[in-house]
Image: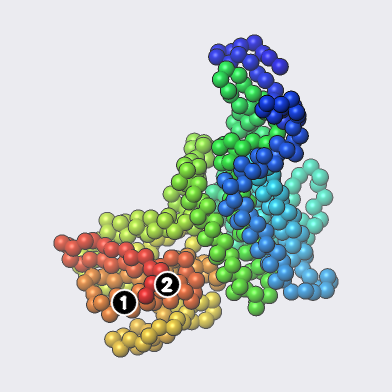
C-alpha cells in the first residue's frame, strides 16, 4: 500500500506478521512463530523484571494463604472485597509478564493501569467495612467505584503517610503515564506501530522488540510489581495471621531491594526522565522511599550539608549532640517525605527496642541499660515493620571505643531489626578538620 511522497518518505507499507516471508524462501510465518522469535529476543532483556513479577505473584499467594480460615459468615466485607481485588490484581500481574515477553508492551502498560486501580482500591478500603459495602453495592455500569484520583488520595490517607495530598499527586502521575497507553493518547500512540526504514514508513502489526518497546515493558513490569507488592503488604498487615508477619515482612523487604535495583537500572539508562515537565511533577530527586541505596545515601549527604550550612554554629560551638541530631533529623524529614524521622526512638511497636550488644563500662545508666537502645535518628514507619535508615552521630574527635560501639549498634539494627541502611556520621568541631564523614555500615562487617 503506497501513498504520495511527503518529504523524504516515499511510501507507507503495511507489514503484517502473517504475510512475512522467511529470508531466502517464500514460506509464510504464523503470528505464533513471530511471537516466539520476539520472546527469544526479549527474554534476556526482561529476565530480571519478569523474575520480580513472578516473585511478587508468588508473594501475593503467600499473603492470601496467611489469612486465617474462617466461616464465610465471619469474614468481614472488607476482607472479602480486598481478597477479590488481590485475585484480580495477581492475574493482571501474570498477564503483564506474558504480553511483555511476547512484544506487546503497549498492552502491558494498559493492564498495569488497571492493576493500579485495583491496588489503590485495596489500600483505600483496607479494613473499612463501610467502604467495602459501598463497593459491593455499586450499581452504576457507566462509572467506576470511585474516580481514580479520589481513590488514590483516600488510599494515602488510609495508610497514614505524611503529606497525603502530595504523595497522592505523585502516585497519580504514575497512573497518568500508564494511561497514555490505556487511553491511546496521541502523544503516545502517534508513533507506535510505525517504523521508519530508509525512505519508507512501515506500518507494523504484531510484536515489537525495539528498544522503545523494551523501555515500556520495563516500566510496566516494574510499576505493576511495585503496586502489587504495596497492596499485598498492606493486606498482610490487616489480615494475615500474626504468626506469619515476620516471615512475610522479611520476604517483602527482599522484594523491595530487587525493585530498588531495577529502578536504579532504569535511571542508569536515562529512562526515568519526565517527558512532560510542564504538566507532570515527578519529584525525581525527592523520593528516596522509592529508590535504591544510592539515592538514600545521596539524600543523607544532602541533609548533612544543609545542617552544616544552616546550623553549623551548633557544631562549631560544640553544642550537645542531641541538639545537633534534632536539626539533622529536621533536614532528613524533608528528604524522606513519605516516612517518619525520629530521634532516640526506643520502641519496636509497643515494646522497647532491644538489641544484643556487648555491655559498655563507660556508659552511665542515664544513657542506656546496655540492652535497651536509643538510636540517634531513625527513618521508619511507626507501628509497622518498615525500617529504612538508622543513623548514629558523633562529634569528632571521639574515642575509638565509642565509635566502634556505635558501629556495632548499627550492625545490630540492620541484622536484628531489618533496617535497610545504617550510617555512622562524624561531625568535626575543629574548623581545620574535614567537616564531616559518613560511613555506611554493612551488618556483615566485622
Cα–Cα span, label 1 and label 2:
13 Å
Local SS, label 2 = loop
Which residue lies at the image location 32% right of the left edge and 60% below the top edge?
Answer: 304
Q: Which quadrant of the figure contains the N terminus?
A: top right
The vertical placement of 142 against 126, above or below, is above
Furthest residue toward left: 432
Number of the label disc, if any, that sits on residue 404: 1
Mark 1 is surrounded, within 10 Å at the Cα level, by few (under 14), some (14 to 19) or many (20 or more) other residues, namely few
Which residue lies at the image location 77% right of the left edge and 74% below the top edge?
Answer: 69
Relative image position of residue 133 (x, y in whole percent) = 78, 60
The vertical placement of 106 against 20, above or below, is below
132 left or right of 293 in image? right
Which residue lies at the image location 49% right of the left edge and 62% below the top edge?
Answer: 339
Which residue lies at the image location 75% right of the left edge and 35% below the top edge?
Answer: 31
Who is closer to the viewer here, 367 or 130?
367
Relative image position of residue 35 (x, y in whole percent) = 70, 39
Local SS, label 1 = helix
Relative image position of residue 303 (x, y in whole percent) = 35, 58
71 left or right of 316 in image? right
Q: Is residue 288 visible?
A: yes
Residues at circles 1 and 2 in contact by the CB criterion of under 8 Å = no
Which of the colour schemes (rainbow, by chain, secondary structure, one colour) is used?
Answer: rainbow
Q: Earlier in the sequence, mark 1 or mark 2?
A: 1
Q: Which residue is mark 2?
A: 443
Furthest residue toward front: 24
Amino acid at each position: 500500500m503506497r501513498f504520495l511522497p511527503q518529504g523524504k518518505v516515499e511510501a507507507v507499507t503495511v507489514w503484517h506478521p502473517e504475510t512475512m516471508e522467511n529470508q531466502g524462501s517464500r514460506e509464510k510465518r504464523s503470528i505464533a512463530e513471530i511471537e516466539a522469535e520476539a520472546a527469544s529476543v526479549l527474554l534476556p532483556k526482561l529476565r530480571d523484571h519478569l523474575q520480580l513479577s513472578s516473585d511478587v505473584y508468588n508473594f501475593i499467594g503467600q499473603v492470601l494463604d496467611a489469612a486465617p480460615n474462617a466461616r464465610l459468615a465471619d469474614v468481614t466485607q472488607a476482607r472479602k472485597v480486598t481478597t477479590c481485588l488481590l485475585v484480580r490484581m495477581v492475574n493482571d500481574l501474570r498477564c503483564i509478564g506474558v504480553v511483555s515477553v511476547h512484544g506487546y508492551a503497549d498492552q502491558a502498560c494498559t493492564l498495569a493501569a488497571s492493576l493500579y486501580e485495583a491496588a489503590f482500591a485495596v489500600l483505600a478500603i483496607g479494613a473499612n467495612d463501610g467502604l467495602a459495602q459501598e463497593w459491593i453495592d455499586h450499581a452504576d455500569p457507566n462509572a467506576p467505584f470511585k474516580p481514580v484520583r479520589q481513590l488514590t488520595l483516600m488510599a494515602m490517607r488510609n495508610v497514614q503517610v505524611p503529606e497525603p495530598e502530595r504523595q497522592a499527586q505523585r502516585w497519580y502521575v504514575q497512573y497518568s503515564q500508564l494511561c497514555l497507553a490505556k487511553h491511546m493518547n496521541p502523544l503516545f500512540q502517534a508513533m507506535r506501530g510505525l517504523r521508519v526504514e530508509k525512505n519508507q514508513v512501515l506500518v507494523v502489526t504484531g510484536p515489537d522488540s525495539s528498544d522503545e518497546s523494551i523501555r515500556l515493558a520495563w516500566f510496566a513490569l516494574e510499576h505493576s510489581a511495585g503496586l502489587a507488592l504495596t497492596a499485598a503488604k498492606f493486606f498482610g498487615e490487616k489480615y494475615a495471621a500474626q504468626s506469619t508477619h515476620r516471615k512475610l515482612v522479611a520476604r517483602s523487604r527482599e522484594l523491595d531491594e530487587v525493585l530498588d535495583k531495577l529502578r536504579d537500572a532504569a535511571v542508569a539508562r536515562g529512562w526515568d526522565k519526565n517527558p512532560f515537565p510542564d504538566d507532570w511533577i515527578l519529584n525525581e530527586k525527592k523520593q528516596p522511599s522509592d529508590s535504591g541505596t544510592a539515592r538514600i545515601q545521596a539524600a543523607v549527604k544532602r541533609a548533612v550539608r544543609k545542617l552544616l550550612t544552616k546550623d553549623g554554629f551548633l557544631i562549631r560551638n560544640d553544642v550537645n549532640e542531641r541538639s545537633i541530631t534534632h536539626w539533622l533529623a529536621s533536614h532528613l524529614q524533608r528528604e524522606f517525605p513519605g516516612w517518619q524521622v525520629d530521634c532516640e526512638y526506643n520502641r519496636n511497636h509497643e515494646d522497647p527496642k532491644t538489641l544484643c550488644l556487648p555491655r559498655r563500662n563507660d556508659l552511665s545508666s542515664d544513657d542506656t541499660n546496655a540492652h535497651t537502645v536509643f538510636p540517634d535518628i531513625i527513618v521508619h514507619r511507626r507501628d509497622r515493620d518498615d525500617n529504612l535508615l538508622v543513623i548514629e552521630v558523633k562529634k569528632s574527635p571521639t574515642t575509638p571505643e565509642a565509635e566502634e560501639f556505635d558501629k556495632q549498634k548499627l550492625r545490630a539494627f540492620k541484622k536484628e531489626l531489618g533496617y535497610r541502611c545504617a550510617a555512622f556520621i562524624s561531625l568535626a568541631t575543629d574548623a581545620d578538620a574535614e567537616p564531616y564523614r559518613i560511613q555506611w555500615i554493612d551488618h556483615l562487617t566485622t
